[in-house]
């Protein structure tokens, strides 16, 4: 039986090859933390981590992920054990309606790792670009119609500061 | 009038639903009833704007794997048709669909395929074959095409208004005569409209994403010809609305008629492209203005004429001239609105109807006049402020536009422009914001148990505005307890009917209803105490309801309410109501001043925002954190309206060229730079019992114009066709 590892547990992959990871989470596992904003890779609401890297769950088929490790927002932290970025989102009010938030946080968690790794962004070659601008650039695949962008950048900046302490 | 000595109202309390939202536990409409395993409905969309379905072949789809039914006009069951002349109310009228073989706009549903899974439904939808005998769709393509006077304008404004006398030619020193155009725009809330519906024993249970609950029940009752008592609508979390979810849309009707047909729970979630066609958008506008000033730089004439499309059969027209009527003093003011009935999807409220696009045009034209008159645009605005309503002469309950402009300019450092780098130019822009305040009928229930736990219930919604939190804050202050001790339950039609979320009226109206309910609750408890204690001030502490003896010497010795009121009397509840009678007849406006600093590349025309700043006055701020976020959100929209957003129409087919996030460009994180704001706090108890005024639409009003004016300041190019894209700057 083909499986993927979701938030630490093995789950069997769906039979229908047309099922995206996103629809798999919703339809088969009733796991709704990951959101669908466009289903076309245009909004980032469905961002999850696959083997530690951010991926739009609407753009991969579930069957492609055999033996992969998938982390969704449910695996990032729990109500009584929030990830520092989840806490920072609350403190900085980095969301309003909350619909893009799971994706923003998964993207942000991945971004933190990208910075630790020294992975480049489209602006990081330029030494004049500030950390905030670099974060903004790296978060631009995650749309937020409520316009929480400045607060999202602040929340991520807070966590980076915390880590660098 | 009470003056609350509040500590919690106003303060930066974190959202009480925050943990649910950051952990992905908040349940939005499409995620509900999953234990009922709802079937999935997928829309077969019309490829023709107007016409009659002359053939419809569903057999192949019906035989396709997993399919339970294909619902079309032939089998959808009874519905009251859309747009009957006797229909009342935009949000309560019939939302019938698949009830007749006629198509009213491109992308409208021709059929609903219902299957076990989304994949099956989508595939089967491709097997439905139909032919539509089309007619040429009507659109508004030029200013003169709009000749109809709308019955009414959103916000209750008269379509046509004028005041004062036209100035003599001698009195006019400078004039501008400008025509601005704004494109069709869409709310594009991140959560696509979605509904799950199920019939059980003749009762209909619906989870949907809707901003106002009670009219949604009514609309379903009208559409499906049911008794509203048999319908429950719930909308506990809403992934953004911005006007597009004020009323129900096809997802709701389709899920209900689908559920009625297959006798199971059915879920219909719109795809992003379906959102563009099956939910409302904002019409494009052409705004012609003639503005004149005298030799002192005083405005002597404001003429604003607006032309917009109106969707056939649906009474909605925007008051784009609202700002021109109220922002500045002028000897003569004239404003007219014309519309044309068109064959487009629903045209309805999008964030700050009227002012969002009215301010783009009007505040840009005011800027033009200031430059023509040789006066600094900030000074020009300050010199032309009204004391009373410029057209009606009636007083404002409060008016802080001048202070917003003055103090805002200081904070922003209006005079100080940084040095641009090579090949770039930097500009500053300013715009005024005046947004009408609306206070409407609303109600809420507040309950307290013997341990002092407080529960607020109302069918009010939280569309991201922070309603859960501010209602808890208001109740906590009124009942002298902590926010943690208050539970807020929203978005359920079984709770007392509120005003819902929209028109920036939600917080002040429902907040006031909650305050009233708390006061009634205190009255009720006090009335059950012995006479000598009946003025005792209640508070909740350590899981007990206590009170301080009214007599000052004894105030140090509190007593337990349960010493006097038997515990089995609890929970005690009370309902609070407010109505239009609780607000002043004077002119009510929230005010603001927007400032922007932009950098423009002179070779490519690329605009980069460097800073956006705003100073706002909106009465009592109920939560400085959530209020600031909401305003910032509006300012982000302003950036999108100025620079990127616009629906492109394909005129022959009356379709949209760019109905998705790949091509309809809302601002992304990196489009926004430094953004900050301040509030001039001034509780306005004439406006509402909690002293608050609307903020949801204030943040966008003027935000885009400040950017447009900054682009002019930087480049001396005035682009009058929004959005201001690179090509328009270089060719300007
Ligand atoms: S839903 Fe996957 S990117 Fe939008
Ligand atoms: S919080 Fe609403 S879309 Fe981002």
Image: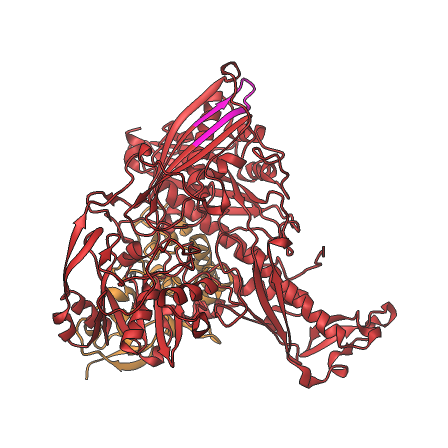
Q: Is residue B423 left or right of residue B704?
A: left
In this view, B316 is above or below B423:
below
Which colour denotes chain A? orange
Near-viewer residue (B283 or B422): B283
- In the picture as drawn, the residue positioned furthest to the top comes out as B170
In this view, B579 is above or below B229:
above
Quadrant in which the N terminus of chain A appears: bottom left
Residue A134: x, y in percent?
37, 51
**Does the rendering let one see residue B699?**
no
Near-viewer residue (A32 or B284): B284
Q: Main secondary structure of the magenta part?
A: strand
Q: How is the image coloured?
A: by chain
Residue B64: x, y in percent?
14, 74
Classify residue B87 by image quadrant.
Answer: bottom left
**Does the rendering let one see residue B139?**
yes
Assess whether residue B731 is covered by the magenta stretch: no
Q: Is residue B632 left or right of residue B263?
A: right
Near-viewer residue (B183 or B654): B654
Assess whether residue B299 is covered by the magenta stretch: yes
Which colour denotes chain B? red
Magenta highlight range:
B290-304
Residue B430: x, y in percent?
49, 35
Q: Is residue B259 left or right of residue B320?
A: left
Query: Looking at the image, how many numbered discs can be counted on the residues?
Result: 0
Residue B49: x, y in percent?
22, 51
């Amino acid at each position: 039986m083909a499986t993927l590892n979701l938030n630490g547990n093995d789950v069997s992959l769906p039979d229908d090859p047309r099922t995206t990871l996103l629809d798999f989470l919703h339809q088969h596992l009733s796991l709704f933390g990951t959101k669908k904003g466009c289903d076309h890779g245009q909004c980032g609401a469905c961002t999850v981590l696959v083997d530690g890297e951010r991926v739009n769950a609407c753009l991969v088929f579930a069957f492609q992920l055999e033996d992969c490790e998938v982390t969704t927002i449910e695996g990032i932290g729990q109500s009584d054990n929030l990830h520092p970025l989840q806490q920072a989102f609350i403190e900085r009010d980095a969301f309003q309606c909350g619909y893009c938030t799971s994706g923003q946080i998964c993207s942000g968690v991945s971004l933190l790792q990208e910075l630790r790794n020294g992975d480049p962004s489209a602006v990081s070659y330029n030494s004049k670009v500030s950390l905030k601008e670099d974060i903004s650039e790296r978060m631009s695949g995650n749309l937020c119609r409520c316009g929480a962008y400045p607060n999202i950048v602040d929340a991520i900046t807070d966590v980076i500061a915390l880590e660098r302490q | 009038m009470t003056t609350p000595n509040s500590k919690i109202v106003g303060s930066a309390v974190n959202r009480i639903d925050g943990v649910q939202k950051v952990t992905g536990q908040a349940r939005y409409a499409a995620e509900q009833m999953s234990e009922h395993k709802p079937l999935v409905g997928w829309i077969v969309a019309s490829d023709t704007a107007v016409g009659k379905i002359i053939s419809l072949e569903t057999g192949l789809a019906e035989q396709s794997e997993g399919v339970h039914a294909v619902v079309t006009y032939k089998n959808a069951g009874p519905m009251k048709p859309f747009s009957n002349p006797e229909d009342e109310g935009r949000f309560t009228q019939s939302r019938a669909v698949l009830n007749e073989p006629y198509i009213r706009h491109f992308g409208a549903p021709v059929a609903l395929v219902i299957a076990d899974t989304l994949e099956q439904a989508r595939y089967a939808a491709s097997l439905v074959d139909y032919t539509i005998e089309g007619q040429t769709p009507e659109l508004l393509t030029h200013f003169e095409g709009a000749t109809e006077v709308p019955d009414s304008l959103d916000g209750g404004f008269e379509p046509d208004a004028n005041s004062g006398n036209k100035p003599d030619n001698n009195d006019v020193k400078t004039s501008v005569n400008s025509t601005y155009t704004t494109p069709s725009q869409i709310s594009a809330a991140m959560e696509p409209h979605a509904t799950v519906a199920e019939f059980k024993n003749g009762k209909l249970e619906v989870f949907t994403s809707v901003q106002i609950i009670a009219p949604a029940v009514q609309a379903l009752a009208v559409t499906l010809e049911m008794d509203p008592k048999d319908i429950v609508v719930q909308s506990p979390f809403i992934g953004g609305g911005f006007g597009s979810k004020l009323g129900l849309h096809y997802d709701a009707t389709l899920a209900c008629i689908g559920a009625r047909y297959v006798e199971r729970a059915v879920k219909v979630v719109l795809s992003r492209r379906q959102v563009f066609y099956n939910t409302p958008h904002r019409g494009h506008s052409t705004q012609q203005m003639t503005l004149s000033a005298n030799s002192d730089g005083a405005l002597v004439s404001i003429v604003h004429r607006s032309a917009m499309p109106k969707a056939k059969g649906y009474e909605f027209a925007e008051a784009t001239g609202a700002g021109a009527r109220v922002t500045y003093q002028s000897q003569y003011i004239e404003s007219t609105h014309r519309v044309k009935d068109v064959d487009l999807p629903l045209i309805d409220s999008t964030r700050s109807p009227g002012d969002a696009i009215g301010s783009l045009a009007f505040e840009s034209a005011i800027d033009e006049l200031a430059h023509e008159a040789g006066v600094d645009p900030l000074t020009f605005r300050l010199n032309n402020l009204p004391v009373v309503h410029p057209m009606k002469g009636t007083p404002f309950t409060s008016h802080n536009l001048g202070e917003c402009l003055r103090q805002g300019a200081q904070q922003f450092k209006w005079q100080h422009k940084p040095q641009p780098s090579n090949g770039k130019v930097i500009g500053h822009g300013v715009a005024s914001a005046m947004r009408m305040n609306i206070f409407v009928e609303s109600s809420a229930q507040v309950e307290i148990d013997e341990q002092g736990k407080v529960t607020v219930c109302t069918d009010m919604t939280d569309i991201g505005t922070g309603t859960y939190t501010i209602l808890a804050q208001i109740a906590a202050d009124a009942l002298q307890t902590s926010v943690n001790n208050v539970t807020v339950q929203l978005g359920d039609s079984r709770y007392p009917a509120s005003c819902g979320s929209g028109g920036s009226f939600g917080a002040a109206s429902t907040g006031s209803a909650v305050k009233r309910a708390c006061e009634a609750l205190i009255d009720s408890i006090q009335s059950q105490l012995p006479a000598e204690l009946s003025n005792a001030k209640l508070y909740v502490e350590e899981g007990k309801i206590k009170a301080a003896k009214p007599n000052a010497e004894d105030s140090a010795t509190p007593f337990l309410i349960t010493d006097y009121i038997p515990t089995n009397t609890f929970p005690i509840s009370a309902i609070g109501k407010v109505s239009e009678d609780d607000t002043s007849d004077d002119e009510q406006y929230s005010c603001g001043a927007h400032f922007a600093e932009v950098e423009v590349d002179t070779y490519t025309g690329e605009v980069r925002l460097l800073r956006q700043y705003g100073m706002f006055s909106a009465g009592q701020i109920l939560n400085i954190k959530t209020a600031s976020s909401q305003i910032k959100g509006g300012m982000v929209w302003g950036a999108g309206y100025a620079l990127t957003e616009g629906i492109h129409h394909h005129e022959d087919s009356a379709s949209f060229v760019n109905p998705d996030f790949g091509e309809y460009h809302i601002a992304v994180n990196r489009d926004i730079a430094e953004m900050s704001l301040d509030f001039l706090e001034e509780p306005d108890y004439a406006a509402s019992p909690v002293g608050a005024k609307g903020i949801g639409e204030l943040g966008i009003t003027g935000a885009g114009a400040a950017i447009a004016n900054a682009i002019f300041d930087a480049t001396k190019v005035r682009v009058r066709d929004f959005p201001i894209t690179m090509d328009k700057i270089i060719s300007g």
